[in-house]
Image (cartoon, rainbow, N blue to C red):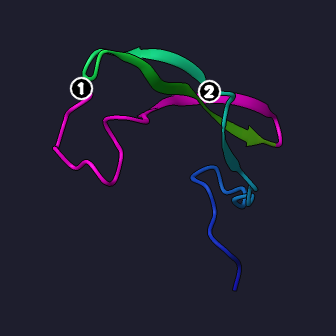
Amino acid sequence: MTGPRQPSGAPYTALRLTTAPGTPTEEWCAVCKAYSRLAGALLLLAPGGVSTIGTYSWCDICEDPADQRGRDHG
């Protein structure tokens, strides 16, 4: 028995992919009105090179676990 095949009949090739956060930058948080938001790119490290697959952001003030007010960053 052989493994799964693509519609073309060629066997699938397993890839090793890794996601990594890029270097964050400090930004203005419109919710708490402070430069406390970190934002950066989500990177995909693949055999063919590096790709940006999205972004992330996190506010040190708004998302403090000790202060759960349910604020929305939109």
Image side of residue 36 versus residue 21, left or right:
left
Image side of residue 48 versus residue 74, left or right:
right
Let me know if residue 12 is in the magenta part. Answer: no
Identify whether 65 is placed above or below 4. above
Label annotation for residue 44:
none
What kind of residue is marked 2? Pro
Q: Which picture quadrant has residue 69? A: top left
What kind of residue is marked 1? Gly
Q: Which picture quadrant has residue 21? A: top right
Percent position (x, y) of residue 33?
A: 30, 15
Per the picture, the main secondary structure of the magenta-coloured stretch is loop
Provide the secondary structure element on which disc 1 rests.
loop
Percent position (x, y) of residue 50?
A: 76, 31
In the image, 21 versus 51, the foreground residue is 21
Q: Which residue shows up at 56% across the image and 31% down it?
A: 53
Q: Which quadrant of the figure contains the C terminus?
A: top left
Percent position (x, y) of residue 49?
A: 81, 32
Identify whether 6 is placed above or below 63. below
Q: Distance between the residues labelled 1 and 2?
A: 19 Å
Q: Which picture quadrant has residue 14? A: bottom right
Dot 2 crowding, Cα within 10 Å, few <14, some 14–19, many 20+:
some
Identify whether 73 is placed above or below 66. above
Residue with the most extreme front position: 66
Image label count: 2
Percent position (x, y) of residue 38?
A: 51, 27
Disc 2: which residue = 24
In the image, 37 versus 7, the foreground residue is 37
Dot 1 crowding, Cα within 10 Å, few <14, some 14–19, many 20+:
few
Q: Which residue shows up at 69% across the image and 59% down it?
A: 12
Of the residues under marks 1 and 2, which one precedes in the sequence? 2
Disc 1: which residue = 74
Residue with the most extreme bottom position: 1
